[in-house]
Amino acid sequence: MFVFHVGIPNFIKSPDDQTGIYGGVASFICQATGDPKPLITWMKKGKKVNSPRFEVKEFDDKSGSVLRIQPLRTNRDEAIYECTATNSAGEISAPAKLIVLEEDQIPAGFPNIDMGPQLKVVERTNTATMLCAASGNPDPEIFWFKDMLPVDISSSNGRIKQLRSGEVVFSTYSYLLNIWGKFNHIY
């Protein structure tokens, strides 16, 4: 006798509302579990996202994806985006609102990246530190992305540390080689 276990999708991480600046970038993250593993899709106004400025990057373990919109356009991109997780047991959805501001609409205290990360070359036995300085009121929270995917510092076994200042430190060269890619940060 075969037993087939089915579990409806459940969100691990649903997308958050965001406010971006015209010409900038927005990255929405969505991750779900279920049995079988759910398929993640992104919708805008009831239709699957489809534009050269919209890129969807799936997590390596297929548990979720990132929707990245670049460059942001005020009238075209302001909308409710929806992450949908679907498997044979069911479907769930989570909305996230994107607001795009023109330069003259940016409120006082809006987060600003004062210094972004630079390409680093380090010797094999040294650590690498990538800097990000951001200002705003309240103080912005800094998130790091590698090749469009969020960097999971908690699962790095201590090899990656994010300091309160927003800096990220890689403690071994071999690990740096394994994860090297295009790093970005958002606030």
Image (spheres, rainbow, N blue to C red):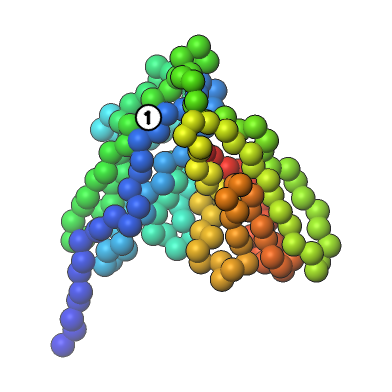
- Number of numbered discs present? 1
- Is residue 16 positioned above or below 121 on the image? above
Residue 153 image offset from top left, x and y in percent:
54, 60
Question: Based on the displayed image, in which of its 4 quarters is residue 61 positioned?
Answer: bottom left
Nearer to me, 59 or 113: 113
* Quadrant of image for the N terminus: bottom left
Nearer to me, 69 or 2: 69
Instruction: Give SS at disc 1.
Output: strand
* Residue density around tag 1, few if under 14, some if 14–19, many if 20 or more, within 10 Å: many
Q: Is residue 181 left or right of residue 109?
A: right
Q: Is residue 8 left or right of residue 84?
A: left
Residue 85 image offset from top left, x and y in percent:
28, 52
Q: Residue furthest top?
A: 104
Q: Is residue 64 left or right of residue 86?
A: right
The disc labelled 1 sits on which kind of residue?
Leu
Which residue is depicted at the point 40% across and 33% down?
A: 18
- Is residue 25 positioned above or below 12 on the image? above
- Is residue 17 positioned above or below 176 on the image? above
Which residue is depicted at the point 81% across and 58% down?
A: 122
Residue 25 image offset from top left, x and y in percent:
52, 32
Which residue is depicted at the point 50% across and 63% down?
A: 154
Residue ID for mark 1: 98
Which residue is depicted at the point 67% across and 61% down?
A: 170
Residue 31 image offset from top left, x and y in percent:
36, 54
Question: Based on the displayed image, in which of its 4 quarters is residue 35 positioned?
Answer: bottom left
Q: Residue furthest right?
A: 123
Any part of residue 128 in sight = yes
- Is residue 36 positioned above or below 146 on the image? below
